[in-house]
Amino acid sequence: MTDTKHNKEFEYVAGNGLLDRRLFLKRGIQFGTITALASTVTQLLQAETETAFNSARPPWMTQPGKPFSLYGKPSEFEDDVVRFPTQNESVLGNGVSWSPLHLMEGTITPNGLHFERHHNGIPQIDPAKHKLLIHGMVKQDLFFRMEDLYRYPMQSKICFIECGGNSNAGWNSSPSRSEAGYFNGMASNSEWTGVPLKVLLAEAGLKSSAKWLIAEGADAFNMQMSIPIEKAMDDAFLAIYQNGEKIRPEQGYPLRLIVPGWEGVLNVKWLRRLMITDRPVMARNETSRYTELQPDGKARQFTFFIEAKSLITSPSANMLLKQPGLYQITGLAWSGRGKIKKVDISADDGKTWAEAELQQPVLDRAFTRFRLPWQWNGKKTVIKSRAMDETGYVQPERTELIKKRGKHGFYHYNAITNWQIDEDGYVSHVYDKNENQTLSDNSIDSSWD
Amino acid sequence: MIKMKIKHSLTIVLIAVGINLVFAETMQGPGLGHAATIDEVAKWNISVFPDGEGLPEGRGSVSEGEVVYNTQCVGCHAQGGIGSAVGDQLAGAQMELTSDYPEKTIGKYWPYATTVFDVIRRSMPMTTPGSLTDNDAYAVTAYLLYLNNLIDVNAVIDKSSLPKVKMPNEDGFVKVYEVKETNK
């Protein structure tokens, strides 16, 4: 197949086979198969598949199906779509589990696949025995029981939460070899529902000296974080529901602070105390951790906003394109500063770019799904995506980010990710071609802080 | 009667103009909070600030802290606080923050000594969090400060001496949020 022939069939929008996004609307377009390497179908299964395909009534049509269930589970054929935990070898509740972004579609993360980061395990809290204390620079210190909070006016917001430490293997001197989600999946997107924080603060009566609030969780780590009061008065809320059901224990049941667009650690789980103050407490997780050491030895602190980021989730690392042909490039983009304005895709290692289709509606500080059809000619190439948000901020290349921040910032890695596709269709993660990839600098491990 | 009517139609207009805005501005809860007493708040509030606010009574010496450390912490953070695969490095840094192998120990990186006490009292030891007495927390804090060459071997740490410990990297942090928001 030559490029001239392709040109007659499709309308190209950028180099190396990127196609008009309206192609999706055309009839009779077939996309190529992308498989995960691990799940290659065996001969035996293929024979069974043939039998099922050839019989007018496959086995599940010859007997009654299963009865109802109290709580539905995914199909048994989807049991590889799971989180990937990396945890402390002896403190088992200390670590993270990564969301399998490369195995999901759309924008909403199912509750059981939302990423986790716990410092010392998941408390099993009885909501009847849990209460929230608001105290400090308020006119009246108040306790709220869960049964009280259930009666407050609620609001919903679909938004992402991303750990400040997400994608931190990107700082390493050699590219991570993990699947896209198991390297970038400390980010997830849910519809959260709960009580606006300002309603509770108004009830307690903020004093004019109030500038910060310190949010504390009821977990074994008893974690605390300082948050500027203007965020609390703006759009922070206390979530009780996630995607329509009560928040899962690992997401902070029964009460979680949500600060839309700000780094994950501030979205304090198992919330039990809000102390109103005039200054930050300088907790361990806002001094020793979640601060970004720069090349000059100074560290950036209170880097709350998640800057725009995008990632092609398919095809992505460790997948296989079975043969040359038409494929759908798809991925996720998000920004803590507002809506995603556009996502560009390159299929020729950044030489030319084309704008991807954004799944509607594009929501403020939420995962935005992008897609673009692509004609792969079977030659080795690099594909990548680049997000721009409504403030005009453009996601940086890795070399650009490192030039600005050095390599020891650890947090807030939001650089463009390159997926290389070789002649066999195998997809792997590579760094920018003009980068010396054998630097002898310190290689941080893909840790979780 | 007339007055009420006017008020009523006004509300309707407002709602029509921007229901979200009106709702957000005037949203009020049912007022179900329960007053918390000073004692209750004092029991719950264990946050310690850089100026020493929140520090409890009690005291601990370096040598007492060494005993606490070697019985309750050494298993994870290793002899001398140099860290392990299980627990963070707390002391013993050889490399500067500007080097290719920066070591972000208490002595090299942490801006405030009060944070050491706070995190130990609230989060450590990981297996039995919250089990340290205030004296033990002071003592092991003293020991870690000593290991980082921040205090003398004979020092005693309490609520008045802890905030006074000079931390070499106190000025090492740039507050990104404050800078951005106030200068815009």
Image (cartoon, coloured by chain):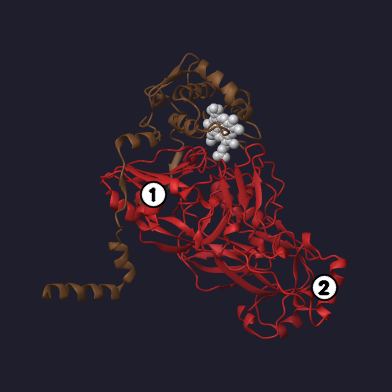
* Residue occupying image coordinates x 52% and y 38%: A297
Q: Earlier in the sequence, mark 1 or mark 2?
A: 2
On what subunit does the disc labeled 1 rest?
A: A
> CA–CA distance between discs 1 and 2?
55 Å
* Residue occupying image coordinates x 51% and y 63%: A243
Residue A175 in sight: yes
* Residue occupying image coordinates x 63% and y 73%: A372
Badge 1 element: strand
Amino acid at circle 2: Thr
Above or below, A11 against B88 in this view is: below
Amino acid at circle 1: Arg
The colour with which the image depicts chain A is red
Residue A145: assigned label: 1
Chain depicted in brown: B
* In-front residue for pair A107/A191: A191
Image quarter where the N terminus of chain A lies is bottom right
Residue A49: assigned label: 2
Please provide percent x and percent y for residue A192: 47, 60
